Amino acid sequence: MSWASPLNYYRRDSRIVNACVIDRAKEKHCGVILMGGHFTSLDIAGIVATEKRDIYISYQPHKSAMMDTLINTGRLRWAKGIVSTKDVRAMINILKSGGILWIAPDQDLGLKGGRFSDFFGIKAASSNSVFRIAKMTNSAVIPTDFYAGKTLREVTLRYHAALPLLDESDFLERYHRFLESSIKHKPDQYLWAHRRFKTRPEGEMDFYQGEFDHVPG
């Protein structure tokens, strides 16, 4: 389990591609947001990313306080700090002080403060919080993907060119096209169990009524 294993167990056989993207972003912006998705190697990618950089990790609070404590205690071994996705003020303060924040906004949290955006050709409830926080703090948003190799000890972490902050719709479209490309590379490593299409437009039936018959391939 990555929450308890020695950090070097994962770092020694993993690699980072395009690390210079962060350095270039730091020259022009106050803070940096590393924006990725929920893949099976999420925590291991965090261990790899923080070997030479201080990175704050955002997280969606778990319903179980015990699970929250277990997960966060494990992550604090390698993260600079942990911040709830509900604590917008804390995220803003981190970025305004020049920090790096890791966030994965690919979960269906309803439409409060968000909108529907196409994901694999299907309307998905999507949060606009990353766009708004980035604009507010003059932060760069760097798409980040990662994959496990033959074992979870061999993770490849890649940083991509920062997304332009033109408007909310364009930003979400670009993020989803990036995420789709990442998933197609390793579809078996994406956490579809998070039910990305739970919230439906008015009049549409429950997407998961037939279990996972409709999950995109």
Image (cartoon, grey):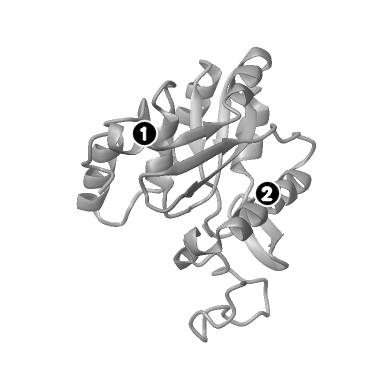
Q: For the residues marked 2 and 1, what is the alpha-carbon distance in whole angstroms?
A: 25 Å
Q: Residue at x 60, y 18 (%)?
A: 23
SS state under label 1:
helix
Q: Secondary structure at mark 2?
A: helix
Q: Is residue 132 left or right of residue 195?
A: right
Callout 1 amino acid? Arg
> How far across and down, in percent of the image, does residue 57 sit?
42, 35
Q: Is residue 86 above or below residue 51?
A: below
Q: Nearer the viewer, residue 202 or 71?
A: 71
Q: Which mark is residue 111?
A: none
The residue that mark 1 highlights is 11
Residue 134, position in %: x, y? 63, 30
Judged left or right of residue 105, residue 61 is left
Q: Nearer the viewer, residue 16 or 73?
A: 16
Q: Estimate the x, y position of residue 213 in percent, counting from the top left.
A: 55, 83
Q: Judge whether 97 appears above or below 19 on screen.
A: above
In the depicted view, which residue is nearer to us: 211 or 161?
Answer: 161
Q: Residue at x 41, y 28 (%)?
A: 50
Seen at 73% across and 43% down, the residue is 171
Which amino acid does the dot numbered 2 rest on? Answer: Phe
The image quadrant that residue 47 belongs to is top left
Q: Residues within 10 Å of mark 2 (few under 14, many from 20)?
A: some
User: In the rendered image, is residue 88 in sight?
Assistant: no
The residue mark sitting in front, 2 or 1, is: 1
Describe residue 96's horizontal placement relative to residue 181 as left or right.
left
Residue occupying the far top of the picture? 27
Residue position marked by numbered label 2 in the rendering: 178
**What crowding class fits label 1: few (fewer than 14 Cα within 10 Å), some (14-19), or many (20 or more)?**
many
